[in-house]
Image (cartoon, rainbow, N blue to C red):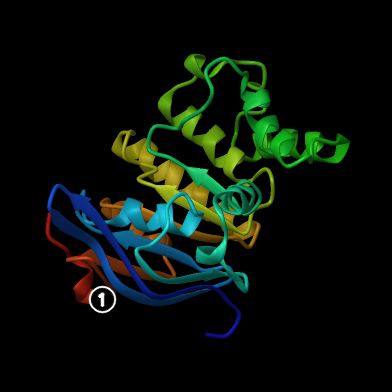
């Protein structure tokens, strides 16, 4: 693939359950280009979150290699994967995962602090992102004072603040009502494309289909690219 950023080669993931081996992912082979927005569809338990954990280096595959930006992620030790994840991955979670004892602004400072990037320029970037997500007046608020939609807007800003290579979104609309979910999808699409980021979003919600450059369905441990009428999937 031209301008390839991510390449999965023969990725499999198995878990041992007592005396039985449970296969979650089976020999995945896929390439993703820089700036692409990928949507992963599938039932709960189909392996979407497992794949995101592998792409972020939280977990390692049972076999196969994951190459990101010409770096073999599967060859790194745990500390190296942690450093890679801290610098190059931005996360958006279903349940927001904001730190309740930090203000909104402090939640956005945290990824910068962890990457030794908390300087005057990036503090100004925090304010710019708060404006971009429509919450410029909530920087001193604590997360529990925000609605679910507002918390997810802050989570999007947090995912982008340290200028990562990749944004991984795991059911980002799953804890929101339909209308709020649509707003979050539109905001993610806008900001990710503005910043020319690569995003992989795992979901079972139809409202995200429209923002995808490519759509994959995960079933039986396999990824299948789908288009047109094939976009329908089992509930």
136 or 52: nearer the eye? 52
Locate residue 29: give its quadrant.
bottom left
Q: Furthest-bottom residue in view?
A: 2
Q: Is 11 left or right of 68, judged from the image as shown?
A: left
Label 1 secondary element: helix
The residue positioned 27% from the left and 56% from the top of the image is: 47
Disc 1 designates what residue?
A: 228
Q: Furthest-front residue in view?
A: 19
Residue 162 at what x, y percent from top left?
69, 45
Q: Is 193 left or right of 199, judged from the image as shown?
A: right
- Can you say whether 37 is above or below 229 in the image? above
The residue positioned 56% from the left and 33% from the top of the image is: 154
- Can you say whether 30 is above or below 121 in the image? below
Quadrant showing the C terminus: bottom left
85 or 35: nearer the eye? 85
The residue positioned 50% from the left and 59% from the top of the image is: 199
Locate residue 225: give its quadrant.
bottom left
The residue positioned 62% from the left and 27% from the top of the image is: 107
Q: Callout 1: 10 Å neighbours few (<14), some, many (20+)?
A: few
- Can you say whether 68 is above or below 16 in the image? below
21 or 223: nearer the eye? 21
Residue 229 at what x, y percent from top left?
20, 75
Q: Is 180 left or right of 235, judged from the image as shown?
A: right
Residue 196 at what x, y percent from top left?
63, 63
Q: Furthest-right residue in view?
A: 120
Residue 109 at what x, y percent from top left?
70, 31
């Amino acid at each position: 693939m031209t301008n390839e950023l991510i390449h999965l080669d023969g990725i499999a993931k198995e878990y041992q359950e007592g005396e039985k081996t449970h296969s979650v992912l089976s020999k995945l082979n896929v390439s993703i280009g820089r700036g692409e927005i990928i949507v992963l569809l599938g039932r709960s338990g189909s392996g979407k979150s497992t794949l995101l954990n592998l792409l972020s280096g939280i977990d390692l595959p049972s076999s196969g290699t994951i190459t990101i930006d010409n770096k073999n992620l599967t060859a790194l030790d745990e500390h190296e994967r942690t450093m890679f994840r801290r610098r190059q991955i931005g996360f958006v979670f279903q349940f927001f995962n904001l730190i309740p004892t930090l203000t909104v602004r402090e939640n956005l400072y945290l990824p910068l602090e962890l990457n030794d990037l908390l300087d005057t320029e990036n503090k100004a970037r925090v304010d710019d992102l708060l404006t971009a997500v429509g919450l410029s007046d909530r920087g001193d608020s604590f997360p529990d004072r925000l609605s679910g939609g507002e918390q997810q807007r802050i989570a999007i800003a947090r995912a982008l603040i340290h200028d990562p290579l990749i944004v991984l979104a795991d059911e980002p609309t799953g804890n929101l009502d339909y209308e709020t979910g649509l707003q979050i999808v539109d905001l993610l699409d806008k900001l990710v494309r503005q910043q020319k980021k690569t995003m992989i979003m795992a979901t079972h919600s139809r409202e995200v289909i429209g923002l995808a450059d490519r759509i994959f369905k995960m079933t039986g441990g396999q990824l299948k690219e789908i288009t047109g009428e094939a976009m329908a999937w089992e509930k």
